[in-house]
Image (cartoon, rainbow, N blue to C red):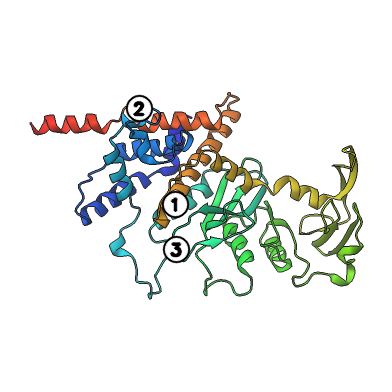
Amino acid sequence: MCPIQIFNMIMGNMYQKIVFESNLYAEQHNISLNTNIEELKAFLGLLIYMGYHELPGIRLYWSNDPNFYCDRVAKVMPVKQFLKLLRCIHLNDNSKMPQRQSQEFDKLFKIRPMLSHLQEKYKTMYKPSRHLAVDESMVAFKGRSSMKQFMPLKPIKRGFKVWALADSQSGFLLNFDVYTGKKSDGNVEYGLGENVVISLTDTLKNKFYCIYFDNFFTSIPLISKLLNGGLFACGTFRVNKKFYPKHLMKSDNKYMPGDIEYAQSKDISVMRWKDRGAKPVTLISNMHNASESTIVNRKNKKGEKIAVKCPVGISDYNKHMGGVDKFDQYMANYSISQKSRRWWLKLFYYMIDTAVVNSFILYKESCNTMKKKYINHLEFRSRLTDELISDFSSRKNRLHHLKIEL
């Protein structure tokens, strides 16, 4: 399958929805837009192009300075038309937005149609490997929004937090949601992290996938609940949380490098291992025998590789926890995101990027199935740009309409 076929499969009827809502918004504000699907695809193609052919500002692609001017962009549409599309592009009818005081109020109303569409598409169009990872991503945003988060330990420190479930092997994004703040209607039995895992994995029940997550999400009741729902899971654990078997484990300062300690109660196991860090790693699992160990390679002070015993659960966690990180790496390389004060537009860019990255992963999988050689991620984006733009030119369209009027 070619890039545009896969991308179109993901976008589906969202093209029509975006065109309708954008024209409606323009009409409501007395702006002459009259865009169509062909122009929208060309617009998205230009955004993808700008992601891997980056300049400091959008207007520079049409600059009179030959050091910035980009013929590939300027031939497709004038700068005024591109900026008009950027200004008017919409996903939902603002006039139908529920009042903040009402029960139907949705902080993500502006992006809800596309968010719901992609969530459903990603759940059904890819068969993942056995190992999946849950983690958080950040969408950079420095403007004003009640949903904006500050994460000092993340590469992107300010922006929107996105909960993500991804395939550990390929990095395919299987499910995601945007964090909007504390909810009063959540499952009070569990904390925020546990509820996120339960929500993201809801459609996977009784399929016995192996889910990995970090200590923000992990709790012993969650691990037990997932097993009862037909899902294996393991995650790093904070020893100050409830139900940690403190009386069976040594204190942190008594561990020497390579030390292993464990405890098991029925299907729930707790493993501790002192690696090279200051504190031992603690892991909770419902799919590992706590007493099983394997060999991993570590470097000593002389730089020589030595074999060290490590619990199998911790070794598996290190192998399979990086699914969301793989996806984020694809996103970071050629993100289409542009500067904007409109919070929802930053999330729109993010969702288009997820569609491009997932399209590339599906393309790779199809090539591997047919034992064909595949192009790399950059070449994929380049080809997708060409196929989205095709032979579209708003200048040609304008001349055509003028001839018809004459």
Q: Which residue is mark 2?
A: 71
**Mark 2 or mark 3, which is nearer the start of the sequence?**
2
Alpha carbon separation for disc pair 3 and 2: 37 Å
Q: Which residue is mark 1?
A: 346
Alpha carbon separation for disc pair 1 and 2: 26 Å
For numbered disc 2, what is the local secondary structure?
helix
**Mark 1 or mark 3, which is nearer the start of the sequence?**
3
Q: Which quarter of the figure has residue 252?
A: bottom right
Q: How many residues crowd mark 3 within 10 Å: few (<14), some (14–19), many (20+)?
A: some
Q: Which quarter of the figure has residue 280?
A: bottom right
**Mark 2 or mark 1, which is nearer the start of the sequence?**
2
For numbered disc 1, what is the local secondary structure?
helix
Residue at the (89%, 63%) spot, across then down: 253
Q: How many residues crowd mark 1 within 10 Å: few (<14), some (14–19), many (20+)?
A: many
The vertical placement of 59 against 199, above or below, is above
307 vs 334, nearest the viewer: 334
Residue at the (55%, 27%) spot, across then down: 375
Residue at the (37%, 27%) spot, across then down: 66
30 vs 92, nearest the viewer: 30
The vertical placement of 400 against 330, above or below, is above
Q: Position of residue 365 (x, y in %)?
A: 58, 34
71 vs 206, nearest the viewer: 71
Determine whether label 3 and label 1 are within 8 Å by CB: no
Q: Position of residue 46 (x, y in %)?
A: 38, 36
Q: How many residues crowd mark 2 within 10 Å: few (<14), some (14–19), many (20+)?
A: few
Tag 3: amino acid: Ser
Residue at the (77%, 70%) spot, across then down: 240
Quadrant occupied by the C terminus: top left
Q: Which residue is mark 3?
A: 145
Alpha carbon separation for disc pair 3 and 1: 12 Å
